[in-house]
Image (cartoon, rainbow, N blue to C red):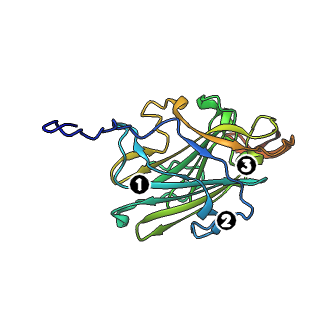
Amino acid sequence: AGPGAPAASAAVAPAVPALTARRELPAARFSTPPAIDGDLSDPCWATAPQAERFTDDLYGQPVADQTIAYLGYDARYIYVGFHAFDSQPRKIVAQQTKRGASLAGDESFIFTIDTFNTHKGDDRSSFSINPLGTQVATLASGRGTKLEWEGAWKSAARLTPDGWSGEMAIPWSILNYPAVKGPTTCGINFNRFQQRTQLTSWWSNVGVNGFYDLDGQWIGVRFPGFVPRLSLLPYAIPAWGQGPGATLRSGLDARCT
């Protein structure tokens, strides 16, 4: 520039908002699984992909008390770990101890998976725990309405000086998934409810109305080979009426998955 010419100003790139929905997480296969004890010191978590920067479902803004979730898998289980930070850990609420009961009123962390990636509510399976490790699950298409059908998925949680942490191990055998070969993509999400603030925060924010097409994507996962299973559940229900004696109703529920 010649004498007296104004100095060139540096170009300023426009701000790009951070992605809050339809987020992606690469699939990571664990060679050594974690011990499900609520402690995230297992070596596999150090290399697992992280789901972070949770936002509140009402305004889509990052919440003050953040959560970091981790996800991995092997031929038998899906493994979920998380650390839920809390600036006032003494106010964390956890009272429910009965498996399958409502966690309303408690802190909770929820992992959801849509193995067919349809973005439909009926195709999402969810797995929730509170800081006591109490389990609540809802399997896709209304399956698992009985705890016996739900399967023995594992979970544990513990309080920490800066919040609480937890782990889950979810058997592939309790899920339905497509018989595809090679890497594929399925829907996933993580969300947390904090009782003290009444805030629900999401990793991939579906909003208060639950627009599941905004779920996150698990990229490159390889489903185990699907093996059909037949499960039988006998039951007996005694009853006493106003008349003399008692009745006994029995039967056998069958399920093929």
Q: Amino acid at mark 3?
A: Glu
Q: Amino acid at mark 1?
A: Gln
Q: How many marks?
A: 3
Q: Position of residue 248 (x, y in %)?
A: 78, 44
Question: Residue 34 shows which numbered tag?
Answer: 2
**Which comes sooner in the sequence, label 1 or label 3?**
1
Closer to the camera in the image, 126 or 95: 126
Residue that badge 3 annotates? 148
Q: Are marks 3 and 2 in contact (CB under 8 Å)?
A: no
Image point (16%, 37%), residue name = 6
Task: Name above or below for residue 49 compared with residue 89.
Answer: above
Position of 252 compared to 22: left or right?
A: right
Dot 3: within a 10 Å radius of its alpha carbon, few (fewer than 14), some, or many (20 or more) residues?
few
Residue that badge 1 annotates? 66
Q: Are marks 1 and 3 in contact (CB under 8 Å)?
A: no
Image point (74%, 46%), residue name = 174
**Which comes sooner in the sequence, label 2 or label 1?**
2
Q: Position of residue 165 (x, y in %)?
A: 51, 63
Q: Position of residue 60 (x, y in %)?
A: 37, 38
